[in-house]
Amino acid sequence: MKAPDFIYCRAESLADALRLKAEHGDQARWLAGGQSLLAALAFRLSEPTALIDISRIDALRGITFDAGVVRIGAGTTHTALGVSDIIRRHVPLLAEAVPLIAHAAIRNRGTIGGSLAFADPAAELPACCVALEATLIAVGPKGERRIAANAFFEGVYATALRDDELLTWIEIVAAQADEQQTLVELTRRSGDYAMAGVAAVLRGDAAEITHARLVFFALGDRPVAAAKAAALLVGKPLDEAQVALAATASAQEIDPAGDLNGGPEMKTHLAQVVLSRALRQIMTQAKAKAERTAA
Amino acid sequence: MSAIIDPAALDRPNSYIGKSVPRPNLPKLVEGRGQYVDDVVLPRMVHVAFVRCPHAHALIKRIDAKDALAVPGVLRVFTGQDLAVVCDPWVAVLVHLAGMKSAPQYPLPLVRATWHGEAVVAVVADTRALAEDGVSRVLVDYDPLPAVADMETALAPGTPLIHPELGDNLCFQRINESGDVAAAFKAAHKIVEATFHTGRHTGVTLEPRSILADYNKGSGKLVVHHSTQAPHMMQGVFAKQLRMAEGDVRVICVDVGGSFGIKVHVYPDEVATVAIAKLMGRPVKFIADRLESFGSDIHARDHRIHGKMAVDAEGRITAIDIDDLTGIGPYSVYPRTSAIEGNQVINLVGGPYDFANYRAKTTVVLQNKTPTCQYRAVGHPIAVTVTEGLVDLAAEALGMDPITFRLKNLMRDDSYPRTSPAGMKFEGLSHIKSLGRLMDMIDYPALRAEQDAARAKGIYRGIGFAAFIELTNPSPFMYGIGGARISAQDGCSVRIDPDGSVVAATGVTEQGQGTEGIIRQIVAEAVGVAVGAVRVITGDTQNTPYGGGTWACRGAGIGGEAALQAGLATRAAALEVASAMLQAHADTLDIVDGNIVDRATAIIRMPLSELTRIVYFRGDTLPPGLPRELMQTRHFITKEYPFAFTNGIQACWLEVDVETGLIKLLKHWVVEDCGRIINPLLVDEQVRGGVVQGIGGALYEHCAYSPEGQLLVGSMADYLVPMAAEMPDIEVGHIETPTRESLLGAKGAGEAGTAGAPAAIMNAINDALRPLDAQVLAQPFSPERILQALGKVPMRG
């Protein structure tokens, strides 16, 4: 479990990163937090000729809020994401997801951009970004390109990023006043990859749900939006009957492969459980919010 | 001193036995200043990495190392044929296991590879990374052969033979029988029956298997730095296999980062490393990485057990009948053999209970998977799972509470010495007292009330119990009588140095459990000095008395007694000198806190360092005929009983999420009786660590294979070890029934936790699921298996 030989170079700026990439070509890979890449190298699953370290580029770090849009630098660590007031206030889904990502040591080094670009189908952040309808911004030799999150993930470890592009920023529209966000996942042990998980974003009030996005993770080759289940929720109040209806419908929208934890049937069963739990959590959150407002 | 030491009666400055004295090596290890094999760097050292077989079973047609040798830094490539020139194969059988058979095993296979992960070719290079570069460029032309993956069909006609010369795939079979089982079942009031599976798992050590072999062609001597539990045994093994004199081999293990039984076996890749060192005349290092460890460290506990229990109308167990089957991989593992686990199962089933009719059969078969062998609590978790699973089923069938049923059937505390239906001799156990102590700890009625209240809310909680016996302090009856050169005896040399400090060299070894700590406590108390004045030497065949090392819970009971006797003898030797110097009868003197004192008044007569100054530097002033033997060696071996059995009982309180199949452990309790406790804190942590490993086997750990015999786990993301966040509070209580075989009275404590935990968890899960008419009997009790039992998910083919 020793990586084969490779060239290491550290980019000092975005321009420097693109220059180094042009110099080293297709076989060079971006090194951000290294939490997945270095393990892959040790297993010799990947043998890049060069690693371009982008972890010191200041422009890729930090979180800003402007004109209703939250902008996150791709090099922002999970830990930084988790403690950000902007995230807690405007994108609570991400704040909820962060403690579920692996373990503290990994969160201290791993980055949001790394997680999205790696595109592990069981990871939390890709599903969150799809549920939040985030915009992913990539920079390449030809300039900047904006990619909708739901078009970004193309399969297991596969994304719409071109070889010469670097994921730089993530933009997310801040949560609206009547918006509820939550994430539920099931793991054998805390910090494990989920057996099944869902990110849910709903808008509306006690009388009617006006918007619903339900995105599964660990249940397909990429984040899987349960669009039909979500559509069932819109235009009606959220109650136990609706939860059951959505959960049953969602089972038709996934086709998970089995893994060491269990077969496809178990995964499908757990998908319905996480979806139900997420929706019930949203009901509880909405109720608490309504009571706060009334008080 | 003729009575067993009573800690309460010895509350004087150096009474350490029975106290939680911090262990001496802890600050060093915590500061990262231990010396593990990988920390040892020798001049001219090279590294070896292995090409491992990707098939469960394959013919090795051709090996092409041309490209590997072209990698800069790669020095040599060795095949099985190359190493066979200097190294003989071994066959792991024990003659007391009648009929047992296995095939000769070489450090690297000559013709066929027989499991996924077997080392096939060795590549030696300047660094490990370069050696791996070389490994990736060795071309091995395999001809895949049909594999024996399923142990259930290993003996069926038409199944390929792994070693045709053996005639079949049967390694060992034994029936252990007493009484009249058929009659008892015929007369039974109720019969319960079930099939249990204990999943194949392995021990995961923080420090992987590691070896650094240094053969000096000039002196003809071999020094092996080895992460092992049994340095003297390995000295003999290396000498024999490499055709050397035992005296020309020295094995050193300074710090060992965990063992759990994994590091007490002969591994072909390690022997290959030593053979390469001999061939190259250079120090060769092999550190197993995590990926290769999963396929090359021994696995264990791959058993299927049919069990049957008969009870009478009063609720007494009248008979137990079990049929155990285990698949052990393609070779029995040298020198302990892979038949011991199954043999233990049929020796231990029913262990805590008073019944007369017993039949147990074990069938040990060969298969194309990683070899299995002894891992912490060998056979115990399997035997306890079957016994306690049947006990709960019987209680249920009778409509009895599981505690009432156990109280009715456990052996009485005043019934010893006695022999179990399985033929095990018990000197003295405390099942009834232990159960009583457990009841004091758990508040059983309150738990049942909480269970009922939770069920009313749709929350499923369960409580499970598991009584157990544990085999410790093994005599030669375990291995020696079978012809294995494994010492059941151990020794300790204690000496007083000129500064009055004490050195104890012992044959038992330290792997992180605190062996050096307890030896230090015992010797300090025996000699009469502060613990800080005692240094302990372990893990060096050149500098310690010959001994077996640490395994089967023998460190405290065997090594501890040798240390106690050596310490007492050293004290007596010092007092003999003091008697002459002080013109006082030796009986009137004592050693306390490093001083010679008047026994009656405790008045200090002189420091020990004054006595040593005279002995070592002014011996001319002492009477000429006076012995001054300030170094004494004693050995100990048990004589009356083949094993010193311990006992105890565990309880588990958990919650099953019936929607997800996930289990939340709420609390765990253990009462155990390991005889004299030398260090309560270390015993408690041994028990807790053991329980955690038991929880691992019950809920998480699984060496999963495909139906074709491909190992599916390769990292700690696939192989789930128990982690802190999921572990419950584990409360430990003690009963002390010292063994009268030794002055110290200590038995082993390291395996009790692992022995009982899986059964307690299984019974608690099934107690939780009882209202839903669901039951799980196959470990690990994964969410999928729970959901299958609940009918929420179909069974997988």
Image (cartoon, coloured by chain):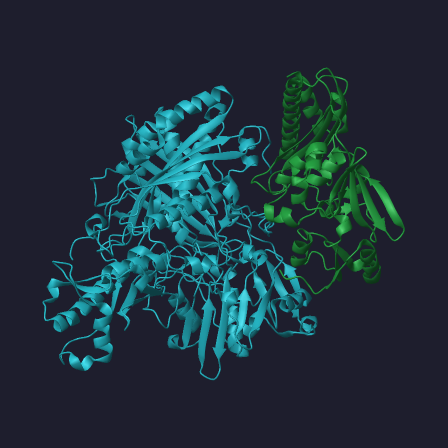
Chain colours: A green, B cyan
User: Where is residue B623 drawn, in percent x and y?
Assistant: 13, 79
Image point 13% across, 60% down: which residue? Answer: B599
User: Where is residue B66 drawn, in percent x and y?
Assistant: 69, 73
Q: Residue furthest right?
A: A142
Q: As drawn, is B342 to the left or to the right of A280?
A: left
B762 or B528, nearer to the observer: B528
User: Where is residue B31 drawn, in percent x and y?
Assistant: 48, 59
**Image quadrant of residue B336?**
bottom left
Residue B306 in view here = no
Residue B720 in the image: above or below residue A97: below
**Image quadrant of residue A18?**
bottom right
A66 or B691, nearer to the observer: A66
Image point 31% across, 43% down: which residue? Answer: B647
Q: Residue furthest bottom?
A: B218
Image point 47% across, 57% down: which residue? Answer: B30
B296 or A278, nearer to the observer: A278
Quarter of the rendering occupied by the N terminus of chain B = bottom left
User: Where is residue B714 drawn, in percent x and y?
Assistant: 60, 52
Quarter of the rendering occupied by the C terminus of chain B = top right
Q: How many numbered callouts?
A: 0
Residue B781 in view here = yes
